[in-house]
Amino acid sequence: MKNKVRFFQSVNFKIALTFILILLISIEIIGAYFIRGLERSTLESFKTGMNTQAETLASTLGNYLVNREGTSDEQIDSEIQRVLENSDSPDIIEMKVVDQKSIIRATTNVADKSSIGKKNEDSNIEDFSNRNMVAVDDTTGDRVQINVQVIQSTGDTVVGVLYVKSNLEQKYREITNIAYIFVTASAFAAIISMVVAVLIARSITQPIGEMREQALRIAKGDYSRKVLVKGKDELGQLAETFNQLAERIEETQEAMESERNRLNSVLAHMTDGVVATDRRGKVITINEMALSLLNVKQEEAIGQSILMLFEMEEDYTLRRLLENPDEILLERPSNDKNLDAMILRVDFSMIRRESGFISGLVAVLHDVTEQEKTEQERREFVSNVSHELRTPLTSMRSYIEALNEGAWQDPEIAPNFLKVTLDETDRMIRMINDLLNLSRMDSGNSELQLEFINFKDLVNFVLDRFDMMVNNHEKNYKIRREFTKRDLWLEVDTDRMIQVIDNIMNNAIKYSPDGGSITVRLVETHNNIVLSVTDQGLGIPKKDLTKIFDRFYRVDKARAREQGGTGLGLAISREVLKAHGGTIWAESRENVGSTFFISLPYEPYEEDWWE
């Protein structure tokens, strides 16, 4: 959003203000010198004039104060009064003459006529000496010039003194008026100068403003307009240079945009995640695949430290990644809560400039969860197969060594040793057959021998065999059947399905307590039939419930080996049901029992179709 510049913040105002301040400072300095000089000149001229006038008047009055024969004092006073009145001027406030006896002989102050003939009481003329001073009038409070001039006769004899008080305040007022006129003229000059300065400043700042507008348009990606060149001065040259700069920026922006689109297209279609950082390790680019793998949003990732994004700040530092940009493995929680953690392999590489300066990091993320899981399963499978085969082989070797050392001659020991050896051999054969079956299923070489059968009859057939085995079994148990009344016709591989039900029933019998009951339910849903087998055993811990269908996985390993289990029954059952398009799962509560479920796709047949 464009911010409007206020007038008092604009360059126009600053230029005009600077011009006016310079002008005012110059005028004030000149005015100060001028007023001060005028004041000094006026006051000195006034004082000089008053002194000259007082001296002239005192010289004139010297002849009148001398006693002349045939002339009375009244006549002399009258003549002196006339001389004072003839010498009076607007600048003079008062004049008076005092003789050598300190008697006031004449005065121009109408209000003080009664003092004529009386003794003088003014301290300024008591000592009969010349005096020139500035004082304040006690009556008006104005500043006055006082001149005291000695009156001498022809023989330089002091015969009196002339007292002249002139209006000095008037001169100060005149000077003040002149200063006021000067200030007023300066104000008018400042206003006129401000208008002129604003116009001149606008002629300078208007091209700058146009260039600013163009810069804002360039920032928004609009390169269509150009700055108008109005002259050949420096501003005109700057405008031409700005237009050339805009063209270069447009060309560069188009090239960068093309490269960015190409890069974004490459990043968007990559099957690997890509994260790029600046030299401080802050994320500046991240593609969609990386966002999906890391389970974060783009606004959360951008600007975040790559160490925090990968949750590795406790084990790694940015310097360590820059110095040793090797690959690492990260374990991240999966987006699906039902799945295990996701394993990511991260390959780091540095972004270097031509100068060799490291300006950032690029991290490429590969989802290696399946590879790691497969590798782990392969290692576990090899370990389990080795362990499962080594155990019976070790047992067989021990018994065979004992027989070889002479135990075969003992009629009581030899048969038992041979029986154990035979049992372990059978166990290994069963394990190898199971492994071969799983291998064929994994490779897709195992073909199902499908036939259309009544699945309820098949389950009953298997359960009947287990009912008949109760008397020969070391453990007592009871099988309860809860079947739907309808016949359920399915196309299945009978031998494989019997193998699955056998595995589940054998597990239920193994882990059920003596005298316990096993409940078998067969129900029909809309699109499936579900067979469930519930025992009253110890149950399966929650942490093991999702792993019991893995190969060689046993919850109770010791007991399973004692009872001849290979650890492959449930894994085979899962593969058989997967080949039939069905599923198998389990539910369990510890110390209560477990329930195994088999679900197969089912479409009810119509009698007309069967016919």
Image (cartoon, grey):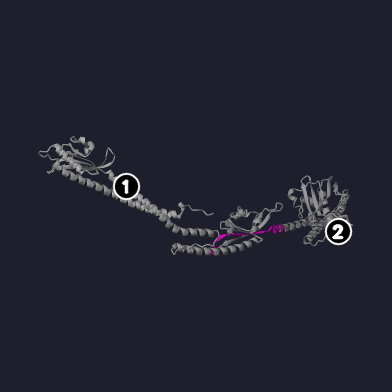
Q: Which segment is the magenta one?
A: 353-374
Mark in front: 2 vs 1? 1
Left or right of 534? Residue 46 is left
Please tell me in which quadrant of the rendered image residue 385 appears: bottom right
**Residue 507, horizontal then vertical, whole percent:** 81, 51
Would residue 355 be counted in the magenta stretch? yes
**Residue 365, horizontal then vertical, whole percent:** 64, 59
Please tell me in which quadrant of the rendered image residue 173 appears: top left
Give the residue pinned by disc 2: 451
Q: Secondary structure at mark 1?
A: helix
The amino acid beneath tag 1 is Asn
Q: Is residue 486 visible to the viewer in this orientation of the structure?
A: yes
In 3D space, how far apart are the residues under numbered discs 2 and 1 (Cα atoms)? 131 Å
- Name the N-terminal-most of marks 2 and 1: 1
**Residue 190, horizontal then vertical, whole percent:** 38, 52
Q: Name the image quarter holding the C terminus.
A: bottom right
Give the residue pinned by disc 1: 177
Left or right of 64? Residue 333 is right
Label 1: how many residues lie within 10 Å, few (<14), some (14-19) or many (20+)?
A: few
Q: Are marks 2 and 1 in contact (CB under 8 Å)?
A: no
Left or right of 154? Residue 193 is right
Q: Residue furthest right?
A: 611
Against 356, is 607 above or below?
above
**Residue 377, horizontal then vertical, whole percent:** 73, 57
Q: Name the image quarter holding the N terminus.
A: bottom right
